[in-house]
Image (cartoon, grey):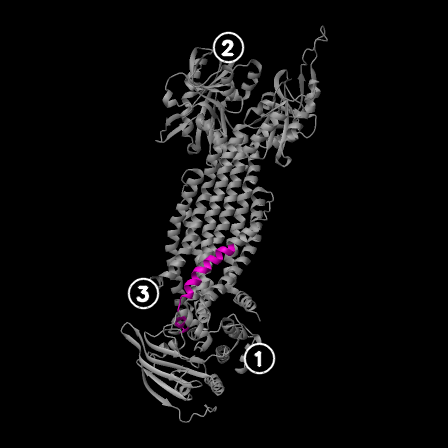
Amino acid sequence: MFFRMIFGTLVRQWKKMLMIAFTIALGSSLATAMLSVMLDVGDKVNQELKTYGANITVMPKESSVLSSLYEVEDGGTSGAYLREDELGKIKTIFWAFNIVDYAPFINAKVTLDDGSETSAVGTWFNHHMELPTGEMLDAGVTSMRSWWEVTDGKWLDEQITGSRNVAMVGTALAQRLGLKSGDTFHVAGAASDMQLEVIGIFDAGGEEDDRIFMPVDTAQTLGGLDGKIDSIEVSAITTPENELAIKAAKDPKSLTISQYETWYCTAYASSICYQIQEVITDSVAAPVRQVADSEGAILEKTELLMMLITILSLIGAALGICNLVTASVMERSAEMGLMKAIGAQNASVSGLVLTEILLTAAVGGSVGFFAGWGFAQIIGQTVFGSAITMRPVVIPIVAVLVLLVTLAGCIPAIRMLLRLRPAEVLHGK
Amino acid sequence: MKKRQMYFRMITASLIRRRSRMLVALLSIAIGATILSGLVTIYYDVPRQMGAQFRNYGANMIFTPSDGSFTQADIEDGRSYIESADIVGVTPYRYESVRIHELPVMAAGTDLTQAKLTSPYWSVEGEYPSGTGSLLLGASLSEQFRLFVGDTVTVSYTPEFDGRSEDETILDNTIDLTVAGVLETGGPEEDYVYLQLSDLEQLTGKSGEIDLAELSISANSDKLRSYAEKISSSVQALDARLVKRVTESETTVLTKLQALVLLVTVVVLALTMICVATTMTAVVTERRREIGLRKAIGASNGGIIKEFMGEGMLLGGLGGIIGSVLGFIFAQQVSVHVFSSSITFMPLIVPVTILVSVAVTGVSCLLPIRSATQIDPALVLKGE
Amino acid sequence: MSLLELKNIYKIYGDLHALDDVNLKVEKGEWLSIMGPSGSGKSTMMNIIGCMDKPSKGEVLLDGVDISKESSKNLTTIRRDKIGLIFQQFHLVGYLTAIENVMLAQYYHSVPDEKEALEALDRVGLADRAKHLPSQLSGGEQQRVCVARALINYPEIILADEPTGNLDDANEKIVVDLFHKLHNEGTTLIVVTHDPEVAEVAQRTVFLRNGKLHKETINENFTGEIKFDK
């Protein structure tokens, strides 16, 4: 009979119940959308901040201490190199998933036909990798130098140019040499000389405007540096540093085992650096403070901002639901009074109301969850052009929230029902 | 007694004497209005606040000499073209090759107080040099020379041969400085030694010349571009350039962030408005019997709509006022907690919030009231 | 001419004849009771007389005007001007004071007049309760406010639907006494009730059964004096 009554309410009072379900659905969709966006905003903004370029640089051990110095002294390179064949290993570290992009750099001094010297930089443009995990990754400066403005021609595409000798030339140098895209020019390196075809001219707004960028093997051939790499720039999604990370960055050995594990398994810039050092022989990986710190600050602010907005909207949604549940239960006081008059106990009246509302809430909540998921995707697509990853944790949070809020909405109504004197209700007081 | 007086007496009586029910409705409208005014304030303030965060990336404009070098006066001249409220910091740099332990090192003479502003990402172990007589040593140099915080170092400089003292051996100028701090950046700065411009001038014996100035300006890229063009064309000695990597990226990220807040605001607002609407619907529906009674004792449909709308809109207005205040407080709290700075008060938001909440409440009352006026008073009054 | 005349009234819902060829005349100043068991058509009849419903067939002449074909908007105007309604459940607006409830009727009718409203309350003996909210009044007092509200616009007819249904004996007496007073002042009263004691005190009682006028009794002893006693 209990279920028959509930069924009766749900079916015959479907309009009222629909309204409650609708409000709960709204609230839960709001909660779902905001929570999903909030939990994912860090990653999304982090992706966006990748436009600032690498936040980790990897250098050979000796060079990190000496190279700049020797460059000042004799203008040459130091003689310490990283190994090109180890590059793939970067995508095998514990936090490989957080490494969104990276590119190796090799510098070769070249002499141009007019006698001037410049730097020929070998790097990846859109190097295609198939990882052991089956993932595909296009890494290189095309994405890591997103602020470059290609003023003439286009970005060098390694997949198209193949083994041709091609290059992108900085705008300052191109102006000096009178180069346009499609032209060829002659360069002489330490080991060999060749004709380079200009694919594009770029404006980087810095010293790179005086350089020639080309695929790694071209530069290696010019400089006679086969298999050698000067440095690697890595763009990784990192967690803002905290005290533990600072302590670890100074000396990982100073940590206790559990601290070490926490640190190693958190995507701090320092732990990623440490893991890169583990896989690249004789390397020193260091966070680029300008990028890493700023990222941390911006991320933290954005997350906090979203969290506060989320809290506000959750409060809004909660109050909205509470209100309506209270109002709609009170509306039925006559009916409840009647039930009490024909002998229903307080408990059974409350039970009936609760079950009805909770059933409605469950339906509304689930509908709202999917709607909210849709909202989150709309936000993700519109703002970041990519889907928002749903965290499973959103489901229990929303469920508990809807449950609590609905119950809270029922409390004043049920208290009122318990105080009801059937006679008064039935006499229309 | 005038009819209008009775009208107001009725609607205020309804608000005041049905206190708890109306409070509930008022609360929901106020929450809606709070969200509206709070989020809109944040939306407008985010670029400014976040922009300040982005200044952490350091200089976004540099002055380079159009010919040789320039002077502090030129910097001041260039600076005068930029709104002073936008300027975060201006740091002059002069680069000279000096020697430490007989090894050549690049030294940058600068204003270290300003450098802290234009390069906030510098991580210094020890202290920032506050006055003259101390320097900031790049981390790689520190390791190379085994020089640490507190050590004293002799920096020497070979003056250029000026042709006057032909037969004498040119003696090095030297200066003794204390290492106040070790600089870590993960970038090329770690290979430099930074000292106060006046110390470097004393060491080299030449003053007034500046090679480069870094500026950190909080403005969007269009504004920056116009500043740069104005300065380059107006100040002869200067060539103002944007640090593309910083400006371009800042615009990209900031635009997205603002779009995010906008979208979130819109979604939250839409849902809040629907919530307000359902609440008002419930409030009106609850009073069907009263509407029936009013009809029975002779109220016309228009009259009923007028009274209930008046009540709803009064409620909306009150909610709007409360919401504007709470919304500002909320935005202020967010600003203080997230950005540790105060929010700009935008007076326009107050009337807009009140208008919107009156309109939303009005519209959400209108529909249920209209349907309630269709009901047959006889049915309602029969005590169903 | 009669004040109110029902001519061959039918009210048909599907197969159900709620009113089936009813004819009734009510003279000005008359006190009429309508009695009948549940489902006899009392409420339908009251709704039609109260301009809240229209008959399916037949004419309703109020002051010589046929109101059976009027639009619901005009019906509202007619009801406002000519009918004073009293309900079993009082139906006072909960958040308005007694006097404001009375003024509400004035407000819809013409212009609210606090002095006049107070006089109306005085007539029902509630002048001292004018500032009380319905929740602070007893059932009988609420019903008297309701009577005052019905009176305030000097209607042609006061139509009361089970006015004593929710009242105890003492309050019932007060209300019936009030009706006597109104009658003596010349007000036309139509009281729908199923309480014989209330019905008996009227000048004339009509009995409804299955939608038809079943019988009619004239109160031979009616003197217009208050003698309802229990």
Of the two numbered discs 3 and 1 in the rendering, the one whose residue sits closer to the viewer: 1
Q: Mark 3 points at which residue?
A: A4
Whichever of labels 2 and 3 marks the residue nearer the N terminus, that label is 3
Q: Name the residue under label 2.
A: A114
Give the amino acid type for the residue marked by disc 2 in the picture.
Asp
Of the two numbered discs 2 and 3 in the rendering, the one whose residue sits closer to the viewer: 2
Provide residue B129's location: percent of width, then percent of height. Answer: 66, 29
Is A234 or B354 nearer to us in this picture?
A: B354
Q: Name the residue under label 1.
A: C128
- In this rendering, would B279 be left or right of B232? left
| Magenta stretch holds residue C173 | no
Label pair 2/3, CB-CB below 8 angstroms: no
Provide residue C208's location: percent of width, then percent of height. Answer: 33, 83
- In this rendering, would A296 be left or right of A359? right
**Depicted B51 relative to depicted B234: above or below:** below
Is C80 or A10 nearer to us in this picture?
A: C80
Whether residue A258 is visible: no
Give the amino acid type for the residue marked by disc 1 in the picture.
Asp
Chain containing mark 2: A
Label 2: element kind: loop
Give the prevailing secondary structure in the magenta stretch: helix
Is B384 or C41 nearer to us in this picture?
A: C41
Provide residue C33's location: percent of width, then percent of height. Answer: 40, 85
Is C162 or B377 nearer to us in this picture?
A: B377
Label 1: element kind: helix
**Depicted A221 relative to depicted B255: above or below:** above
Residue drawn at x 40%, y 55% is A22
Mark 2 and mark 3: Cα distance apart in space? 95 Å
Whether residue B220 is visible: yes
Label 3: element kind: helix
